[in-house]
Image (spheres, grey):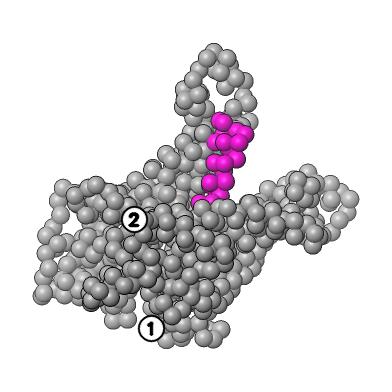
Amino acid sequence: MKKFFLKLAIAFLWLLFALIGLSYFWLPSGAVIQNIDFVLMKPSWAHIFGTDVLGRDLFLRVLVGGRISLWIGLFSALLSSLFGFTYGAFSGWYEGRADKILMRGCELFMAVPSFVLVAVLCLSLESLLPFENPDVRTFVGLCFGISATHWMSLARVTRGLVLEYKRRPFVEAAIALGGTRGHIVLHHILPNIKKTLLILVALQIPTTILYESFMSFVGLGVHPPFASWGILIRDGWRSLSSFPHLLLFPSLVLFLTVWSFHIVLDWVGGRADQRANQKI
Amino acid sequence: MIQIFFKFILKKVFELGGSLLLLASFCFLLLKLLPGGPFDEEVSLNPLVKENMIQHWGLQESTISQLGHYLISLLKGDWGLSMASPDQTVLAIIYRGLSHTLSLSLVTLLFAVLGAFGIAFLAVFYRDKWVEVFIDQVLICLLSLPSLFLGPVLIYIFGFYFNLLPVAFLNSPSHYILPVASLGLRPLSLLARILKSSLLENLNADYVRTAQAKGVGNFKILSRHVLRNSMIPFLSYSGMLIAFLLSGSFLVEMLFAIPGLGSQFITSISDRDYTMVVGLALFYGILLIVMNALMDFGITMVDPRMREKA
């Protein structure tokens, strides 16, 4: 059963990425053009997810929305991991008072419900960023806002690992040979803790994808002419009682994406554990 | 025991009072960066009236002096009036919404913790059988069910299709079922996974074999030895869980039309109601810190090694 689900998850992710990739090169006009003859149709063979209030094909809309959702998810996961790693490595390397202050900062961020921070950060970043295009501003604002609240766990883990590896003989040797701090952390410690960190980074992706949808749903994320899964779910939510397919399909795709990520990561994590056990 | 508890609280209060002031100023400054002010409404006010309002709230001063005034009044215990509805204090508005948010969060927490215990025990009891594999898969499924998906789908299935359960407000026990399910299933699966893995880890530990060799009963081994050790990661996660629940309740309150703090926050932020937003952020901070302190206290109670450290 486990194998079957894993295959299913991998197949779904491939299909999703392939279709979204394809949509960059070739997109039928049904995704953008509004057509009054096709308004609010139930799912059929011509429109497998049905059509929305403005007669656009929902399947294509979900693909177009997936672009934004996935990009924001990936970017925020990367950004937050980068920040978390730097923060944690700093704090682990310099121990003592600096470490204490940095970890207090970490706790402070954990003490605010993330939504409060993201909402305020996104909105203020949107107005501050120097980009002309408002869509780019929203995109970057969301990425920064989301990553500002998701770096803490990675920072803590990195700190612990750096603290642990600092005492290893090979690091002491590198210090004795006169290696600079940045060099030692990046070239001696990082290769050793890479695997653990990569899984954590990958685990951020489903979380950030969900967060983006959540923000767009509440109305503080991407704005309506633009599509993202959150926006599509928001549109569907408004007409839930009479046209449930508008809500069902986008949220099903969101669920399947997050589920596939979890299944695949669970498998990768399990394998990494096994390998570690064999080595010992 | 009570002494340890009070020492703990006092230490936490002093440590985190500073952090809270920092948090308040951080939110205040960020809010000032937002475009627009509390008096830019769709129906534009008479410029003279607007001028008067700005004078009244002291918004013409520099941001730093406004922040200073705010922090000083905060230290005096005065959270100010809401700018959007100036006949009410911020604290009164928080107090009104609090009962809904708190009861929803607590019921959900109870549901998640009890459910996690049940499921984890079931999985451990039937370990290495198909039941465990099945539970594992269900837990992963639940883990990827966000309230954004679960809420609307549950509302459609139980509210509209079968017309079984009420879908809005929190008036009677049956009103709680859908919001709690859509908010609590994800934390439940997270907790169950943590508890299950730590239970399995501890069941293979040497001290369990020793206890068995001494002839201690199975139930006693589980309750006295294994459970106690497995509670530590569980409790330290529960603190984070509360933050998760409070954040998640924003969405659930919106979906189920519950007049709690979350919906209040969303309206205040779009109204640029400065005092209200900062007040709410601060209140959430205090709530989380108190909850985290309670969890820490729980850990020290369970784990004697931590007690010595404290």
Q: CA distance from mark 1 to mark 2?
A: 43 Å
The span shown in magenta is A91-115
User: Numbered disc 2: what chain?
Assistant: B
Residue A169 visible from this viewpoint:
yes
Location of residue B92 in the rendering, given as x and y in whole percent from the top left corner: 51, 77
* Residue at 49% in and 30% down: A190
- How crowded pointer 1 is (Cα within 10 Å; few <14, some 14-19, many 20+) is rated as some
Residue B11: numbered disc:
none
Query: From the viewer's perspective, is residue B43 above or below residue A122?
Result: below
Q: Amino acid at mark 2?
A: Leu
Q: Is residue B216 left or right of residue B172?
A: right
Q: Position of residue B175 (x, y in %)?
A: 51, 82
The kind of secondary structure the magenta stretch mainly shows is helix
**Residue at point 34% right, 55% down?**
B33
Examine the rendered structure and indicate whether residue A145 appears above or below residue A224. Answer: above
Q: Residue at x 48, y 66 (%)?
A: B279
Indicate the position of residue A143 as horizontal and vertical percent values. 34, 50
Asked whether disc 1 touches disc 2, contact meaning CB atoms under 8 Å apart, the reply is no
Please rate how many residues cluster around mark 2, counting C-alpha atoms within 10 Å: few if below 14, some from 14 to 19, many from 20.
some
Q: On screen, B131 above or below A186?
A: below
The label on residue B33 is 2
**Is residue A208 shown to the viewer in this render?**
no
Q: Which residue is mark 1?
A: B160
Asked if badge 1 and badge 2 are on a common chain, one would say yes
Q: Amino acid at mark 1?
A: Phe
